[in-house]
Image (cartoon, rainbow, N blue to C red):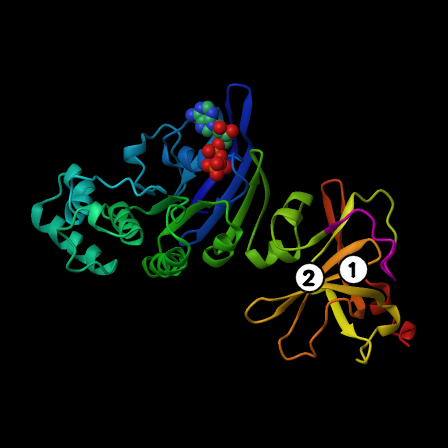
Amino acid sequence: MYVELIDINKSFGTEKVSDHVSFGIEKGKLVGLLGPSGGGKTTILRMIAGLEDPDSGEIRVDGKVVNQTPAGERGIGFVFQNYALFRYMTVYENIAFGLRVQKENKRKIDERVKYLIRLIGLDGLEDRYPAALSGGQRQRVAFARALAPGPQLLLLDEPFAAIDAKVRKELRSWLKEMIRTLGITSIFVTHDQDEAIEVADEIIIINQGRIEQKGTPVEIYKKPATDFAATFFGDGVWVRDYSELRSFPWVQGLTGALIRPEYVRISKKSEDIKYQSSASEGVVEDVSFRGNSFEIRVRVGDLLLRAGRGPDEAPLDIKETVDVFIYRILAIKGREVFLLENEVMKDDSLII
Ligand SMILES: Nc1ncnc2c1ncn2[C@@H]1O[C@H](COP(=O)(O)OP(=O)(O)OP(=O)(O)O)[C@@H](O)[C@H]1O
């Protein structure tokens, strides 16, 4: 593992912001720390950077314990959400700043800065001041400035937060591509799950100072490890009582269940579908077009479920009575999560 946190604890006053945090990150990976505001993500980043000290536990970078290494000597690049560029310095000077501090020779600095300006696609803008750049361009400069001294690890704290939605999307794919090309191990903080899914090779979900789960976006979505990971990550309707849904085993002591839209199959009464006999009757309450699919809200008894439907399937009308078949549910018992499959799918003899 290139970066390792081993049993890190940290409190501010009586508030515990890192609670036995341990994880490892492989070299070259781009990892997202995802969680609600105040969950402790930034504090973890700051401890790795050396801007904050853990109360206990060990931080290792490239096999070396860095707890006692000052921030400036850890060889780590940092990008903040608010660019943090020097306003009175040009693009060129901003990028050169770290190298000048390191007292690199002038020719080397010039080569490196020009290379980085080309890399971030800002050729011709080297003499501009930050005020004359767009938000996206400023963030590219912040990125180049962090990369200039050649760090082996890059930390990004909500790097896209201050940028408007459209540019943010472009900047995300740009950053992902850039980090891939450079092969630099990177950790970024976000509270936006779409961003984490789109950008990260792996996601670490953090809540109330604890790690809830670490895995690829698909792993976390398909197999959430805790109740928090299940409800925080991905879509779904939370139900306390699923007894109205047919053919599901009843489990004692459940807290509730989560029904993801793709677990729900809606069909018109005129359509002939597999497992129809185990479908429940529902009424369509809302249909909204989502660009490449429809989102359907359908009521089954007391439950208001969500499902998707392809644009080429027969359209559904509001108030239409339909068949609703549910393949599986994510059952939650305390912090534990498990998949319950519809029983009719296990036993084909039940299919009529
Ligand atoms: N220097 C500090 N002194 C006191 N409390 C702090 C300090 N830094 C952070 N905190 C508190 O620690 C908790 C975790 O903060 P942190 O910034 O790590 O969370 P976060 O998950 O990054 O949240 P956000 O997305 O809002 O930045 C918060 O309650 C915050 O108020």
Q: Position of residue 244 (x, y in %)?
A: 87, 56
| Residue type of the residue flagged with mark 1 | Arg
- Comparing 291 with 207, the one in front is 291
User: Residue 121: x, y in percent?
Assistant: 24, 61
| Location of residue 27 in the rendering, given as x and y in whole percent from the top left corner | 41, 51
Quarter of the figure with residue 173: bottom left
Q: Which residues are magenta?
A: 238-249
Crowd around label 2: few <14 · some 14–19 · many ≥20 (10 Å)? many
Q: Which residue is mark 2?
A: 261
Name the residue: 31% across, 53% down.
Answer: 136
Q: Is residue 98 magenta?
A: no
For the point 25% across and 50% down, which residue is it? 141
> Which numbered marker is on residue 299?
1
Residue type at the position of mark 2: Pro
Q: Nearer the viewer, mark 1 or mark 2?
A: 1
Name the side, left or right, on which 333 lies relative to 118: right
Q: Is 331 placed left or right of 174 in the picture?
A: right
The part of the image, by quadrant, that contains residue 352 is bottom right
